[in-house]
Structure formats: structure tokens, C-alpha cells
Image: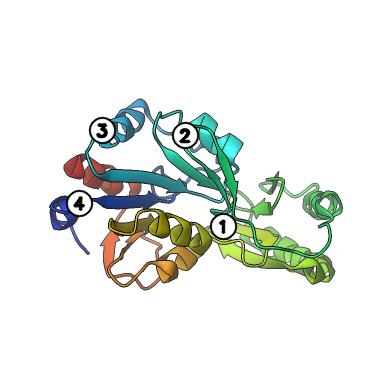
Amino acid sequence: MMSPGRLAAKIRGHREILLMCDYDGTLVPLAPRPELARPGENLLELLQYLLRRPGLHLVIISGRSLVDLRHLLPVPGLWLAGHHGTRVLDPEGEISDLSPSIAGDIPWTKIFSLARKIAAGIPGLLVENKGENLALHYRLAAPGDAAAVLEEFRREVRPYLKYGLEFIAGHKVLEIRPRGAHKGVAINYFTRRWPRALPLYLGDDRTDEDAFNALPANGLAVGVGPRFSGRTRYFLASPAEVSHFLFNLA
């Protein structure tokens, strides 16, 4: 555990910093539904202020789509990496595709229809179609209902894993995505782009473990939130503490 001020002081003296953050549960608190997890004006202003700091590169890496991230974070100069880091949008609007090569077309339409059929009529379940991955949210569902649907979802979707897909669990969400399409891909991309910068990554759940594991030896892994159970050297208790850290860094 480290206070936001102490963590900021630890890195503030570096000439060049590569600051990479998850969105949901890290920059903003988790919400019952994805569309409700929105940044406040203070956070947007803080990100704008940070981007004026010489030598600081700021990147948001998320399981959300680039369209979603661009809508939520309309901040000039910000780098965005969506679809678990496999689609990168630079400040000039250029998109880089870092997706792993997969043989054949993935039948996402069939998978999405199957997921909706399984979740139909169960209160509190939400199927989110992200285009190149799919998420089954069960934060609002009764635990018994969620467990039964998750079991059926895994069983019915398992035949589609032959297309090079995998399951990944997060906070009250189960996703299916292309194997190898994880946030570590984005970490490798950005650390190669700015090799002299001190890299650090802030994240709050299982999908962020790939990012932590991809950090170079001098990188700082910062876990966020009371439910965080991964292995990191540093820890902030909440998105509010992340905001305090960013403010102290700025």
C-alpha cells in the first residue's frame, strides 16, 4: 500500500514517463452497467493538464471499443488502446491494428445471438457486443442465476474456441476474445515506442495481469481497488486515489 502522494513523488523526478491506465475500475469507479461508468469533468480536466507536462506520455488501455473510449475521453493528445489493447488510436486519429493473426473468420454474429438467447429473461444480465469480443455482465444478477448462466454460456460457447478464442473473467463479467488479444500487446507497443521512459501501468482486475506481466524490468505495476488480488508491488485503494495520484503527479 502506498499513498497517492508518495507514489507520485517516487516517479515525478524522471525526465520521461509512460503512464498507462485501465479505464473501468481504475480511472472511473465500476458501474452497474458499462454506459454508466462515465468520467467527471474534473477527471477530463486533470487528464488535459497532465498532457501538458513535458516528457509525459499518457495512454488509456481498455477492453472497451475505440469508439466507446473516444466518446468517453474526448481529450486532445491522449493515446487510446481499445479491444484489450489491440486497437491503438493516436492523437492524430490514426489507428494501428495489433490484433494477433487468426486463421479464418470468427462467427461473432452466431456467438452474440447464442449469448443473448442464454441470457434472455434473466434479470440483471447484460450481453455487450464489442465487435471483436463479447462480454457477459452479471453485476446486477442474483448470484444463483449468474452461476447457472455462466456455466451454460461456457458450455455452449466452448465449441467456438476452435476459432482461436478464449474466455477471460473480470469483475462480474465474463468475456470471450481472440487468444493473445490482451493488454500485454499494447504494453509492448508503447514501451518500444518510448524506450527511455519510465513505464507504469494501473489496473484493477484479471484482464490487467497481462499488462503487468508485459512491463519491462524497470516498470511499475500498480493494482487498484479493494478487490484487487493480483501480484503487484504497489497498490492504490480506489479510483479516487488514482485521481489523487494523477493530481500529485501533475
- Find residue 218 and report its horizontal and vertical position in percent: 27, 68
Residue on which the image places disc 4: 4
- Find residue 166 and report its horizontal and vertical position in percent: 69, 68
- Badge 4 or badge 3: first in the primary sequence: 4
Quarter of the image for residue 221 reads: bottom left
Q: Nearer the viewer, residue 182 or 111?
A: 182
State how far apart marks 2 and 4 are (Cα).
22 Å
- Badge 1 or badge 3: first in the primary sequence: 3
The amino acid sitting under disc 1 is: Lys
Mark 3 crowd level (few <14, some 14–19, many ≥20, 10 Å Cα): few
The amino acid sitting under disc 2 is: Arg
Residue on which the image places disc 1: 172
Q: How many marks?
A: 4
Residue on which the image places disc 3: 52
- Badge 1 or badge 2: first in the primary sequence: 2
Query: Which of the two marks, 1 or 3, is nearer to us in this view?
Result: 3
Quadrant into which the C terminus falls? top left
230 vs 51, left or right, is right
State how far apart marks 1 and 3 are (Cα).
36 Å
Are the residues at dot 1 and dot 2 in contact (C-beta closer than 8 Å)? no
Residue on which the image places disc 2: 38
- Find residue 86 and report its horizontal and vertical position in percent: 58, 53
The residue depicted at 44 percent of the width and 41 percent of the height is 79
Looking at the rendered structure, the secondary structure element under dot 2 is loop
Query: Which of the two marks, 3 or 2, is nearer to us in this view?
Result: 3
